[in-house]
């Protein structure tokens, strides 16, 4: 059996190996990369020190590669302050003010002017670092521990906090914990968790 020659029109499109070119695929529109939408989350309660779940979530996020900053505004200790921030899990930074002990309402009401100024400067130093990292999009997650009390004690203004939250980069999660969270923050929050004392 002999093969009959192909028509000239068909053979002219084939190469010397007998292969025909494949028609090019239609051009598809480019995919758009969508950045994740950050949330403002509030964890509030009438008492202090109740948010271990937030801290464990921050550790988990950092372990998965997120850039995380935990800022505790009213808890100090030995060798604290921005220059002695603790780093964990590669990308988690834990920041406390350069003060000894813990600031509470009794201490604030009975402190001397000199002590108040020292505490005020230490808390503001931590807050300025938080604001800078939010503005420069250097974080994926920020935890502001007891910032409501820092406002109540007069170290930070409510307006400064709400303006900072509203102007942050869209992809950053911000978690606020503790008592005395301002009502304006509740109104802009995406998620609110309130703990109550059971009787």
Image (tube, grey):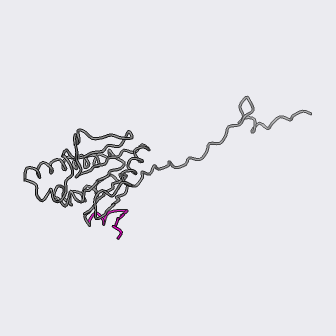
Q: Give the percent coordinates (x, y) of residue 11.
A: 75, 35
* Range shown magenta: 184-199
Number of numbered tags placed on the structure image: 0
Q: Residue furthest left?
A: 113
Residue 65 vs 41, above or below: the answer is above
The location of residue 112, given as percent across then percent down, is 7, 53
Q: Quadrant of the C terminus?
A: bottom left
Q: Residue furthest top?
A: 16
Expressed as whole percent of the image width and height from the top left, the position of residue 146 reads: 26, 56
Q: Position of residue 100 (x, y in %)?
A: 19, 46
The answer to whether 158 is drawn above or below residue 2 in the figure is below
Q: Residue furthest bottom?
A: 199
Query: Is 16 situated left or right of 158 in this image?
Result: right
Q: Quadrant of residue 195?
A: bottom left
In-front residue for pair 139/46: 46
Q: In the shown orientation, is residue 40 left or right of residue 110?
A: right
């Amino acid at each position: 059996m002999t093969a009959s020659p192909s028509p000239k029109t068909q053979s002219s499109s084939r190469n010397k190996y007998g292969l025909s070119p494949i028609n090019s695929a239609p051009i598809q529109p480019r995919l758009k990369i969508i950045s994740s939408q950050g949330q403002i989350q509030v964890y509030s309660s009438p008492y202090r020190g109740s948010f271990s779940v937030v801290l464990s979530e921050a550790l988990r996020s950092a372990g998965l590669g997120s850039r995380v900053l935990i800022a505790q505004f009213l808890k100090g200790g030995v060798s604290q302050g921005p220059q002695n921030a603790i780093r964990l899990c590669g990308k988690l930074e834990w920041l406390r003010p350069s003060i000894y002990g813990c600031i509470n309402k009794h201490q604030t009401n009975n402190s001397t002017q000199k002590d108040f100024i020292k505490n005020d400067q230490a808390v503001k130093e931590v807050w300025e670092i938080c604001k800078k990292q939010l503005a420069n999009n250097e974080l994926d997650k920020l935890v502001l521990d007891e910032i409501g009390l820092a406002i109540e004690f007069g170290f930070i203004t409510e307006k400064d906090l709400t303006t900072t939250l509203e102007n942050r980069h869209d992809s950053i999660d911000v978690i606020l914990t503790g008592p005395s969270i301002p009502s304006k923050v509740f109104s802009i929050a995406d998620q609110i968790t309130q703990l109550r004392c059971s009787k």
